[in-house]
């Protein structure tokens, strides 16, 4: 009888150890700057710091898509530089946003935030529920849409410019398209 009890206690201990290891592995997968899990805003700022320079964004595979996005809501979404390799991969990675959002101000493109984008069909090929990234639920945008792309999920993160409507809302009243010269935006140096 004692050997069965010891065996059950041993199995229970092994099961608890396996759960603890699995939990530590999950914590290790969370992006971190200072040895602890950071917020999505912290991760975005760290990952996109080099893209304060649009030259660096272009060198990393981002390119201008459309013009400055404004709409009937208060504010705009800004000027999107999109990485085509990332947008079609069906995956989401907090350190690799699919789009960088800039505002044209005082003759310069200034990084304002990012947008994570995944096509609905690609996402649901391997996921049942809509995407959530570090606690933030994505919005659904159907097709047809003004961008002429298939149904997609998206999440804006205004990491470099405050948004009085919320960090993760689409439209930012503190960002404007007023100074955007359209196709006259100067090409980044060296391109």
Image (cartoon, grey):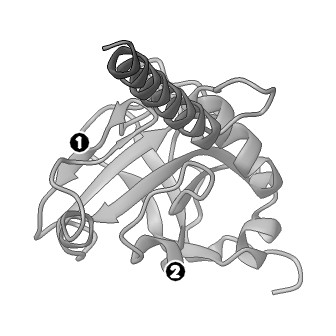
The numbered dot on residue 85 is 2
Q: Identify the image quadrant of residue 162.
A: top right
Q: In the shown orientation, is residue 120 left or right of residue 155?
A: left
Q: In the shown orientation, is residue 99 left or right of residue 133?
A: right
Name the residue furthest bottom: 191
Q: Is residue 148 above or below residue 10?
A: below
Q: In the shown orientation, is residue 119 left or right of residue 54?
A: left
Return the residue at label 1. Answer: 72
Q: Where does residue 175 sit, x and y in percent of width and height?
A: 53, 37
Q: Residue at x 26, y 55 (%)?
A: 153
Q: In the shown orientation, is residue 11 left or right of residue 99?
A: left
Q: Crowding near pointer 2: few (<14 within 10 Å), some, many (20+)?
A: few
Query: Of helix, strand and loop, which one carries label 1?
Result: loop
Name the residue nearer the viewer: 36 or 151: 36
Q: Residue at x 49, y 34 (%)?
A: 18
The quadrant the C terminus occupies is bottom right
**Residues at badges 2 and 1 in contact (C-beta under 8 Å)?**
no
Please say whether residue 150 is visible from this viewpoint.
yes
């Amino acid at each position: 009888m004692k050997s069965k009890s010891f065996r059950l206690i041993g199995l229970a201990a092994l099961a608890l150890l396996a759960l603890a290891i699995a939990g530590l592995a999950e914590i290790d997968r969370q992006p971190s700057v200072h040895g602890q899990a950071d917020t999505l805003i912290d991760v975005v700022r760290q990952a996109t710091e080099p893209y304060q320079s649009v030259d660096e964004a272009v060198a990393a595979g981002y390119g201008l898509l459309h013009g400055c996005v404004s709409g009937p809501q208060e504010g705009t979404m800004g000027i999107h530089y999109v990485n085509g390799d990332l947008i079609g991969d069906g995956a989401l990675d907090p350190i690799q946003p699919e789009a960088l959002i800039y505002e044209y101000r005082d003759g310069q493109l200034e990084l304002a935030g990012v947008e994570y984008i995944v096509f609905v069909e690609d996402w649901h090929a391997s996921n049942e529920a809509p995407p959530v990234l570090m606690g933030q639920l994505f919005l659904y945008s159907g097709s047809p849409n003004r961008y002429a792309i298939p149904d997609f999920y998206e999440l804006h993160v205004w990491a470099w410019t405050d948004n009085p409507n919320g960090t993760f809302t689409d439209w930012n009243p503190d960002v404007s398209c007023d100074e955007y010269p359209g196709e006259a935006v100067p090409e980044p140096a060296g391109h």
